[in-house]
Image: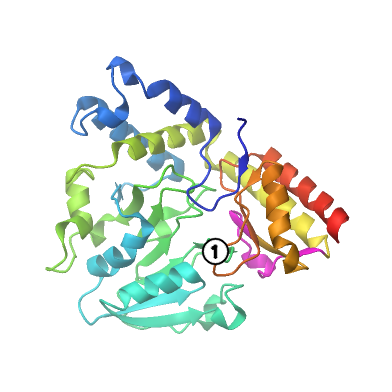
């Protein structure tokens, strides 16, 4: 069976060269007579994998020396609790901006531990934009301000990095991390689930400024304390060695591809091409305000929703997989992460145009 173009929002496509490397490595990794999934996380071989992965990640994102790079488990959703438990005291106010389903979930979780002030909210227009920063209603004494840099479901992306002054800025970057260069120094904490631009689900990337470590509440479980991961090299318990290994291969692949400047050029071109095709049609439409459109997740609807099932069936038959929109919003969604080649965008656009000619 040939590979399809996988537009899944996550778990998402992994670059073909990385899959080839995994296939080669699995039976006999580094001549050890076993796969990487079978070796000890304490072995010198795996310690080398972990150290190289961190070094490559630091190089890709130009992570400053005063930041720690952590690889906990639990996905980005566990960070919804870890952030308030590590950065705020009981009863303290924290600021959140609500721009879609994931920031809404983060707010609900933080509300269990803190007083949450919603500094801005775009639900008035069904989460189709990021509120302009000059209208935010921020707290004077907030422990931090949290945003979701890219809302995977709504396809809404921040066109700016908020200026929070001395208040730590925290961002969920699960669906946009490694898609372009990033000024890490503007953030207190960046976190991202792996299953979009990093590798298989099972590990999480957390980049945290070191002065924010060691401030967890006294009742915080040890495996929810950033300082524990920092002190143990993210090995306070057995980590998901396979996922960590794949993440390292992805980081190596991105470096070999020219780094994030080169990756960004391709990603921007892919997104612009797809949005242009949607905007040029009266059969398809995208609801997101143009300056807030995501490079990574492109939702669109057909002029006749009765054709949705037919569109999905015919797309799948054409080798275009996982285009169904999230169950909460319907329609279609093309997630076009780093591993989606430009040829996949061209194939999707060609299919969309042919489907419109046949069914408009």
Q: Given the current orientation, which residue lies at the most extreme left position?
A: 218
Residue at x-position 35% and y-position 47%:
202
Q: Residues within 10 Å of mark 1 (few under 14, many from 20)?
A: many
Q: Quadrant of residue 357?
A: bottom right
* Residue 269 makes an appearance in the image: no
Task: Specify whether residue 284 is painted magenta.
Answer: yes
- State whether residue 15 is above or below residue 136: above
Q: Estimate the x, y position of residue 264 in percent, counting from the top left.
A: 59, 46
Task: Specify whether residue 114 is painted magenta.
Answer: no
Image position of 276 (left or right of 214): right
Quarter of the rendering occupied by the N terminus: top right
The residue pinned by badge 1 equals 153
Using the image as rendered, state which of residue 130 and residue 331 is in the foreground: 331
Q: Estimate the x, y position of residue 252 in percent, counting from the top left.
A: 45, 32
Residue at x-position 67% and y-position 52%:
271
Residue at x-position 60% and y-position 34%:
3
Image position of 246 (left or right of 179): left
Magenta span: 283-298
Q: Estimate the x, y position of residue 9 in percent, counting from the top left.
A: 53, 53
């Amino acid at each position: 069976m040939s590979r399809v173009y996988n537009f899944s929002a996550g778990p998402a496509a992994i670059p073909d060269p990385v899959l080839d490397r995994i296939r080669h490595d699995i039976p006999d990794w580094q001549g050890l007579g076993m796969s990487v999934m079978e070796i000890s996380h304490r072995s010198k071989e795996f310690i080398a994998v972990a150290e190289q992965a961190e070094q490559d990640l630091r190089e890709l994102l130009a992570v400053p020396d005063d930041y720690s790079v952590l690889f906990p488990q639990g996905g980005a959703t566990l960070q919804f609790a870890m952030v308030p438990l590590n950065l705020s005291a009981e009863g303290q106010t924290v600021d959140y901006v609500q721009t879609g389903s994931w920031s809404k979930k983060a707010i609900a979780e933080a509300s269990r531990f803190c007083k949450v002030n919603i500094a801005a909210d775009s639900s008035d227009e069904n989460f189709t934009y990021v509120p302009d920063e000059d209208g935010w209603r921020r707290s004077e004494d907030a422990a931090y301000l949290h945003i979701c840099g890219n809302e995977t479901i709504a396809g809404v992306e921040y066109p700016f990095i908020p200026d929070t002054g001395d208040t730590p800025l925290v961002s969920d970057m699960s669906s946009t991390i490694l898609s372009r260069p990033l000024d890490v120094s503007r953030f207190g904490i960046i976190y991202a689930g792996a299953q979009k631009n990093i590798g298989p689900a099972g590990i999480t990337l957390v980049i945290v400024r070191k002065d924010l470590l060691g401030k967890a509440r006294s009742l915080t479980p040890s495996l929810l304390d950033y300082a524990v991961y920092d002190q143990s090299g993210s090995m306070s318990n057995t980590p998901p060695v396979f996922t960590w290994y794949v993440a390292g291969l992805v980081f190596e692949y991105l470096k070999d591809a020219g780094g994030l400047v080169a990756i960004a050029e391709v990603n921007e071109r892919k997104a612009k091409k797809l949005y242009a095709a949607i905007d040029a049609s009266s059969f398809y439409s995208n609801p997101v305000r143009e300056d807030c459109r995501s490079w990574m997740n492109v939702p669109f609807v057909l002029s006749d929703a009765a054709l949705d099932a037919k569109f999905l069936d015919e797309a799948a038959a054409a080798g275009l997989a996982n285009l169904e929109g999230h169950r909460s919003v319907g329609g279609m969604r093309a997630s076009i992460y780093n591993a989606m080649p430009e040829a996949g965008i061209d194939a999707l656009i060609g299919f969309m145009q042919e489907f419109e000619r046949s069914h408009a």
